[in-house]
Amino acid sequence: MQMTSRSKTFLLALVLSVSLPVLGSLLAGPVGAAVGAVVALAWLALAFLWADRFLLGLYHARPLSYLEAASVYRTIQRLVRRAGVKMPELWLIPEAAPNALAVVSGHKRLIGVTEGLLRQLNALELEAVLAQRLAYLTQPEARLASIVGALASAAFRLANFLLWGLLSLSPEEDRKPNRFARMWEATVLPWLAQWVRWSLPPTSFFLADHRAAEWTGSPSALASALRKIGRSSTGLESGGPETAHLFLISPWPGRFDLAGWKERALRLDAAQGQRPQAA
């Protein structure tokens, strides 16, 4: 029996609420347990209430205004009417690499497009990408994926602070990773990496691709966009690979790439009735 997205979210919150106080207790007794409980509550509040602000902040995104991107707004408004879904907020990510981020937080639906995406795609390809991100936002897994992305990103940054920030305050001869940092790196981070894969199955990408092709009437446009973005995907200057599953294509090849863009493009070729193109 498959777990629903809501069940997975509840289980994630439960595991965090229990595991961090236990981890703190093992390291520092009752005081450690109390600290772990506070960290767990803060962590969950960040992910459930402010995932959008946190994730968009990682990529230095800002709201995209109608005046600077009227054609983008007209395109997304046309897609929203066609699909009968809620209008998302549009954000601009100052990155040269073409890609698009989608986040669900509370009642908000947000799509972040990079500057490179707006420059490098033609009108049909851009419409297809916006349609795919819009279709992704309608899926129940999108909320859990955003929560896990915020948790994972916060965890990686905390681990980095524990391993390097605190060490820099110690005398040079004593600069060894502390016990909490080692345990955090050995237990929490691998567990969150697995949760990222569990939160968003590859079928979510395939389904969003299929819906986008239906809404635009052009599977080939999305296939072309996937190939163009996939071939130029060399990572982003901001953020981190623990949030790669929130993008159209993982900006970090081989890292959290839950559904390969080459296979997705081939499926779209088949839907168009075209001869499959070389990746």
Image: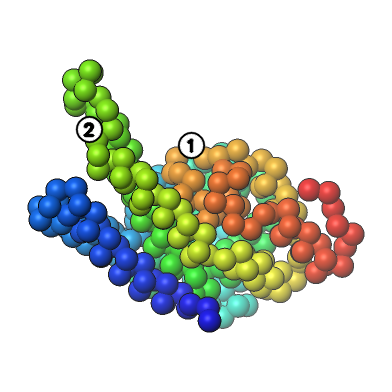
Q: Position of residue 276 (x, y in %)?
A: 86, 57
Q: Residue 13, labelled with which disc?
A: none
Residue 36, above or below 10? above
Instruction: Pick out the residue farthest to the right.
Output: 275
Q: Position of residue 85 (x, y in %)?
A: 53, 77
Q: Which residue is mark 1?
A: 237
> What SS does tag 1 mark?
loop
| Residue found 64% across the figure and 71% down from its top | 207
Which numbered disc, 2 or 1, marks the residue that appears first in the sequence? 2
- Tell me the kind of residue under disc 1: Glu
| Residue found 60% across the figure and 38% down from its top | 234
Q: Position of residue 62 (x, y in %)?
A: 41, 50
Residue 5, above or below 188? below
> What SS does tag 2 mark?
loop
Q: Is residue 63 left or right of residue 267?
A: left
Can residue 122 be seen here? no
Q: CA distance from mark 2 to mark 1?
A: 24 Å
**Viewer-nearest residue: 112 or 233:** 233
Q: Is residue 234 left or right of residue 45?
A: right
Q: Position of residue 88 (x, y in %)?
A: 47, 67
Q: Which residue is mark 2?
A: 166
| Residue found 36% across the figure and 67% down from its top | 12
**Viewer-nearest residue: 139 or 94:** 139
Q: Dot 2, how many residues are within 10 Å of its Cα: few (below 14), some (14-19), or many (20+)? A: some
Mark 2 or 1: the one toward you: 2
- Tell me the kind of residue under disc 2: Leu
Q: Is residue 204 left or right of residue 225?
A: left
| Residue found 81% across the figure and 62% down from its top | 269
Can residue 174 be seen here? yes
